[in-house]
Amino acid sequence: MPPSPTKLTIMSFPQHWDGTKIKANILVLPHEDPLSPFTSGIPAGVDTPSFAEATLALQAMLISGTDNMPSPADVTSNVALVTVAPADAKSLFTQLAASLKITKPSNIVNPVDPSTYIQKYLPKSYRNSFAFSQPRTANAKTDDSYHCALRKKDPSLPKPVYSTDDISWGKAFALALRQPLLATKLGFIYSVDVAVPAGTFDEGGWLYFDLQSGSDYYQQLTLNPDLIKKYAGKLPSLSGSRSLFAAVQFPVSSAPVAGNYDAIFIEADDYNDGFAKIVHSMQPVSGNLLLEPGQEQEGLPPSRDFGIRLGWDDEQLLIWQNRQMAADPDLGTRLDAPMGVFRHRVDVKVHGEADSEWSSLMKAEGDLALNGIDIGSFSGELGIEVAPTQLDGQKTGIFWLPSYYTQWTGGSLIIKDEKAAKLAKTDSILKRQLTAVDADKKPLLYGNTYDFRVRFLDITGGGPDEKDVSVNGGDAPVGTCRFRRHIPPQKVAIPLRENPPADGSQPTTYPIFRPRLGYPALLYTGLANAYNQLLADFPIACTERRETGYFDPDVTHVKIEVEVQAPEMDTFLSFNNKDPFYRLFTTTRQFPNDPTAALNLRLTFHDAAVIKFGDDADLGDLPLTANDDSSPLQLPTGRNIRIRVYALCKEDPTLAYFASDDVRTGKPVTIDVWEDADDERNLFLNQAATREFQSILLQADPPPSPNLAAVMALAGQPEATPSNLFQRLADQCSLDTSETTLLAKPGQRVVFGCSNKLRHTLSPEHGSITLANKTDLVGEWITTLILEINRDWSWRSLANISFEIRRDGAELVGTIEFKNTVSLIAINQADRSKTRIVFFDIVDPKSFTTVFPEPVNVSYTITAIFKSDPASKDPDKTLSMTLPVAVPPAQVPKPTAAGIALSDYIKDDTYSTVQPRKKILWIEFEEPVTNPEDDYFVFVQAYAPDALLLAGDEPVQDPKENLPFLPPEMIRVITEGQPDDKAGLNAWQRLIPAKANADGSGVRHFQVPLPPGLNAISDELFGFFVCEFCVGHARVWSTAQARFGRAIRITGVQHPAPQMSCLVERDDDGISLTAPYANPVYNGVSVMPSNPRTEIWGLLYVQVMQADGKDFRNILLGRKRMVLVRKREHVRVPSLPLYGLCGWSEAEVATLLFTLGLPEDSPLSAMAVELFPNYNRSADPLGTELGTTRIYRTSPLEPVMRICCCPA
């Protein structure tokens, strides 16, 4: 690239206005070799002196008002200045050239690279310090792009470009400017006082500097104005005394300046007091410095204290720096507005102190020299430079500004930590020319809150000093940070734990010492003489191979957590929710006041059956530990105990000193303890024997069918699967199941055992049992022992084989092993106060030895096996019960005859009426019941109306047959002392036996009771029934499914028809007789045709005395066929029967009586007879054709009574 025509730049940096004059710094900066002639041939044949030898005479150019950009034509006044050229400039430049490797060309203007720019992450502390809504520039990021850029690993990137020692004169000048004393000696900086005519800057204005007519380079400037570039500082309206600052520089030009300077004007006005507008700070919350407040849980606590991180004006600095290297979008080239801000100074004071207490953290003093040349004594403030970094090690691409610009750890921000160097024994290699001043004026101490402000330095090193105050203010000109202790204390020292007694005995007293705290955290505690204590510990720490430190003054107590070992996987009640332990209690003990003295911790043991976990105030059977410094820890026997000892810092209820309450606690040191128990009585919980010992009988699962699906849908579970055999067994034992595996319900710990009579597999922790298949369980008594151990889950006194199970006092049927683990299912909302043991055995119900089945007695003995026999323990536990018969009768009934039995014929004294006769069906079997405990039973399977009573040949569908409603007994459970529950006995109807035979032989004749729900007048008796007959256990304890034996089925069973009734009435017109027709029903609904298939005849009788006068007789007077009563032809209520009607007039009755020679007032009776007519209806079926038509039923004889009809 060709060099720039500009060889010198003059910039204006006003510093202070006192009312009459402006104190200002002038930056005069060459662009090329300062030891070579400034120009050659301007004018022709003339070489100007080098910059190192030049004498420059300067003048101040004042422009009133800021209506226009600064231009020589607008200068309102100029002030000649008296400046003195530095005497040693040439020698210093010569030493610079000798000290540095200046080989690269100077004054080269690099083109704009659009791929190279700067970005910055805006931390939360910045965003939270003011009303932040969104970034001002796209290069400011609030997402995780900065974090990703730090972590990314892209193998496609080129190798990092390493810097060399080769530089240009421009970089050498930049290095010199970082030390204002050196820059002044080189002639870069001139400090001047500019007298200002009154009123010049009442409305603001511009100040820039130019060469006087007699100055070196003035002639060349006149011939070539581009040789020197001049920049002006924008001045605010000036009245009273105030500090001044030029944050940006404006080009001085006679021609219009290209570009949009709107934002530049605003920036110049905002920052003309030289103070940062948004200062933010934070104390690191984690060892990962990328984490911010609120993200503490994502990283580890800090291992050392990082002090306070500071940042300021993040977006503004980003905009300024990008403007220096990126093209202006309106121009396509860089905007000519150099950044005047070069470095920054930080002041601190304790929050709440007056503004006069601001103290600079940038002060330094010392004698400076360059390769033996004395530069002079420096006493003043240096600055912090904010520079971007290319994270991939390239010279182009995206650069990133750091999240924070500096970090205060106490002391100076610009001089390396001499105390840390002494502790590390590296102070001898520090070759310092400067030392910090007032570095400890504001010590950094835990518990204090600090205010920070930031003052800007311009390129000349000028800017407001620590006594100045901000004129313009800002969104957050003061950043405040609470400095709290984030570092938890280290582990306490327990020598006896690291070096236990040689005889292996368990100590009952443990000496405990405070932990140590190192640099710089010990200084932050405010401990007197803290640094000297660290220096004294250095040789001891080297011998013990540890870090240098002194006893932590913040640690006043130890926190003691006592835990007992839990089964593996059960970590939810430990203090850290990670280890398989149960927390018992937490207590504290205070250290002696002497920081070097030990605390003695004592232990005492107690037998405790059940310990409650999770409540320090109630530990169940374990005595509480007193929370005083002299009391021993009360510990349980029979458990693996873990004692964790933590260093505990002083109380801080308001968290004025510590960052959080968690910080007060250090990392634990563990002591493991065990002691055998002396008393192991009351091992089992006292519960009802019915819960401890059960015998279970399971039926096979019903096969899948549409009927089963319908049953489930009717139960409101159309998508459900009916419970299978394993589910039934699990539910009865309060267990869960998965296919053929039984396991504990959530929250319960169950340990399983099983005899070898049942094929099975136990899980590793014995917390579940998998059975081979269903057929092993069907039809067998599964004897189940379910005991609850009256010990919490932490108890460990049992041997590996924990229980032995014997049947009937002798036979060892199995064992139970306690494993030191538990399933995750048991941990969910667990009851850890007890453990259930479940043991399964098999008893065959067909193992009876008598002729007929009878109940069986079984008993079991449970013996506990301990690791070490306690002095006191319970006797063995014995459980017993009686099992009912579970085998059905083998006898099958064989009917041989059946009939109708009638009650006696009973009439009244005058034979005017007859009582209805009772009728019942009877049946005869080939042989009596063989088992004296059994009986014959009947069950009605189906019903249908008599087809002869219906309208057609097949007017109703085939009847649906029912099954006996026996309790399904998919699971039958027997417990100790259970009485005979007559299970299933009512599912069938027991036949009523006839009187016993005189010869003592068994009864073979039985009455058949009416079907359930029917009585003698039920309309269902107009039909036929399908019945089953069987032998059942009637007087022995039996299960329902074993109650009845194999049945035989008989169709066409008909009980006696309902008794017929009739209604007879007599009035002045004559006698009327009505009777109902047989009303067949089906499913409770009448199916009688509109024209009944039967016919009813009415019979009229007259009572006369026998000739011997001993009794009355009835003589038939007449008979008539009844006609169907149809009161309203268009209305028919199907549920009501139809009636027939016939009658005799008074004249007819009189004629009939007269024919027989009987008086007209003779007593009369009537009755109705219902018949099944033949296909060819008979004219007189009850007279001349008697016997040709089947008589279905008859009504009782009813007296004819005259009724009285009274007018209304």
Image: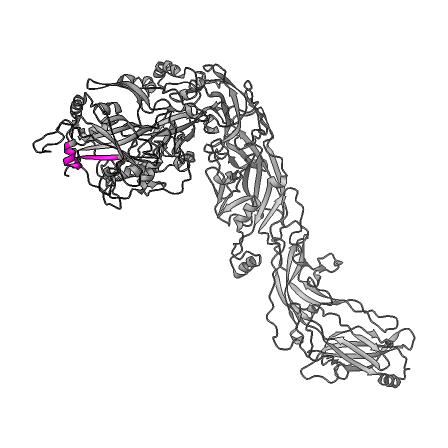
The answer to whether any part of residue 797 appears in the image is no
Is residue 878 found left or right of 390 in the rendered image? right
Looking at the rendered image, the quarter that the C terminus falls into is bottom right
Q: Based on the displayed image, in which of its 4 quarters is residue 545 positioned?
A: top left
Where does residue 745 sit, x and y in percent of width and height? 53, 42
Does residue 667 belong to the magenta stretch?
no
At 58% from the left edge and 23% from the top edge, which residue is drawn?
Answer: 871
Q: How many marks?
A: 0
The colour scheme applied to this rendered structure is one colour
Where does residue 563 sit, x and y in percent of width and height? 50, 28
The answer to whether any part of residue 1075 appears in the image is yes
Is residue 164 found left or right of 540 in the rendered image? left
Q: Residue furthest left?
A: 45
Magenta stretch, main secondary structure, is helix
The front one of 139 and 1158 is 139
At 36% from the left edge and 16% from the top edge, which residue is drawn?
Answer: 541
The front one of 424 and 1068 is 424
Q: Residue furthest front?
A: 198
Looking at the rendered image, the quarter that the N terminus falls into is top left
Q: Is residue 549 above or below residue 1055?
A: above
Q: Based on the displayed image, in which of its 4 quarters is residue 543 positioned?
A: top left
Q: Which residues are magenta?
A: 219-231
Where does residue 816 sit, x and y in percent of width and height? 52, 36
The front one of 922 and 552 is 552
Q: Is residue 483 above or below residue 1187?
A: above
Where does residue 648 sit, x and y in percent of width and height? 48, 23
Q: Residue furthest right?
A: 1109
Does residue 225 belong to the magenta stretch?
yes
The front one of 1103 and 639 is 639
Q: Based on the displayed image, in which of its 4 quarters is residue 1048 positioned?
A: bottom right
Is residue 319 found left or right of 108 in the rendered image? right
